[in-house]
Amino acid sequence: MKYEALLLENKDGVAILTINRPQALNAINKTVMTELNSFFGQDYKSIDGLKSVIITGAGNKAFVAGADIKEFASLNAAAGSALSKYGQDTYMLIENFHTPVIAVVNGFALGGGCELCMACHMRIASSNAKFGQPEVNLGLIPGYGASQRLPQLIGKSKALELLLTADMISAEEAKSIGLVNHVVDDKSEALDLATTILKKISTKGPLAVAKTIKAVNAYYDETQDGYAIEHQEFGQCIESNDCKEGALAFVEKRRAVFTGN
Ligand code: DAK
């Protein structure tokens, strides 16, 4: 798919996806959501040597300031619910992606923007980042997963406080409650740190990385038995070429060369 609202750069196997609507503080409209869905559903397959993904927002003011308020004003219940489901499904593609996805949060991450960064596997914030779920200000509840992922990340009590007051919190406070992994000075440092973490992960067995993401996600999915997923995936890892190579490399005192098989 050719993108209108996303910029895509392949930096040595790290796909950097930038949501590019700075005039609207990168608010998520239908085009952004469709393009995210297309990238994580299929387009990633055409990226040369893809190892991981970074999602960020254009400019230095906003990651994503929410769903595009100007677009969702006149929806009926059925259309609203269908759009919400499409957004949830898109964010699940991100959460279940087989390689690590890091959000570089470079400013406002509100509503659907905070939900987007929560669907990523890790969050690195610049010091000017602000997080919040202001849906109740608009007479709404979250539509892209915050009622589920926020309690998973920060606990029920604090999640309800943020969801019901619509308060915005700073990057440092977000870190202190476990919403973000790291806070650094600015966007460029955040991109550097994300790249360093992803580079480190890219030296590990790709099969093991994908299966770790799958097993951890199973903990949060009440339709799955996480322990069963863990022992099944462990079994598949142990007979993989990656595992044989990892053990051999240890014995031969050299760095493992993994193939992802
Ligand atoms: N949507 C559309 N445009 C937005 C926007 C948004 N969420 N946020 C900002 N903009 C636009 C502003 O309208 C303004 O455009 P112009 O007036 O220049 O044309 C431009 O971006 C710059 O914004 P400001 O002039 O307001 O900038 P300030 O620095 O003064 O303020 C701010 C920054 C982030 C505090 C402020 O822009 C703000 O409060 N923005 C709205 C934040 C917000 O409430 N976001 C929505 C959260 S609720 C759904 C599924 C999910 C959702 C909804 C429906 N369905 C399935 C139907 C989720 C809802 C949410 O995300």
Image (spheres, grey):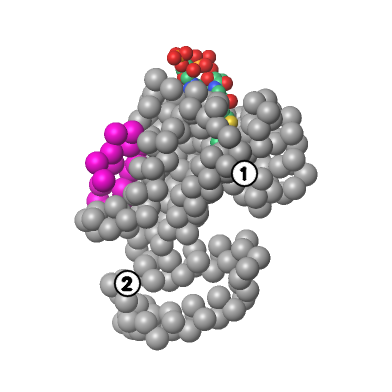
The segment highlighted magenta reads: 1-18
Residue 7, quarter of the rendered image? top left
Q: Is 192 situated left or right of 62 in this image? A: left
Tell me the residue at 29%/34% (across/down). 4
In this view, the residue in front, 247 or 80, is 80
Q: Position of residue 52 (x, y in %)?
A: 36, 54
Residue pushed farthest bottom? Answer: 239
Q: Residue at x 39, y 37 (%)?
A: 32
Name the magenta segment's main secondary structure: strand
Do the residues under discs 1 and 2 have CB atoms within 8 angstroms? no
- Up-down: is 229 above or below 131? below
Q: CA distance from mark 1 to mark 2?
A: 33 Å
Camera-nearest label, 1 or 2:
1
From the image, which quarter does the C terminus lie in?
bottom left
Count residues near mark 2 (Cα–Cα under 10 Å), then give few for <14, some for 14-19, many for 20+: some
- Where's residue 87, x and y in %? 50, 45
Q: Name the secondary structure under disc 2.
A: loop
- Left or right: residue 119 versus residue 250 is right
Camera-side residue: 236 or 113? Answer: 113
Which circle's residue, 1 or 2, is located before the other in the chain? Answer: 1
Q: Nearer the viewer, residue 47 or 54?
A: 47
Work out whether residue 53 can be spotted.
no
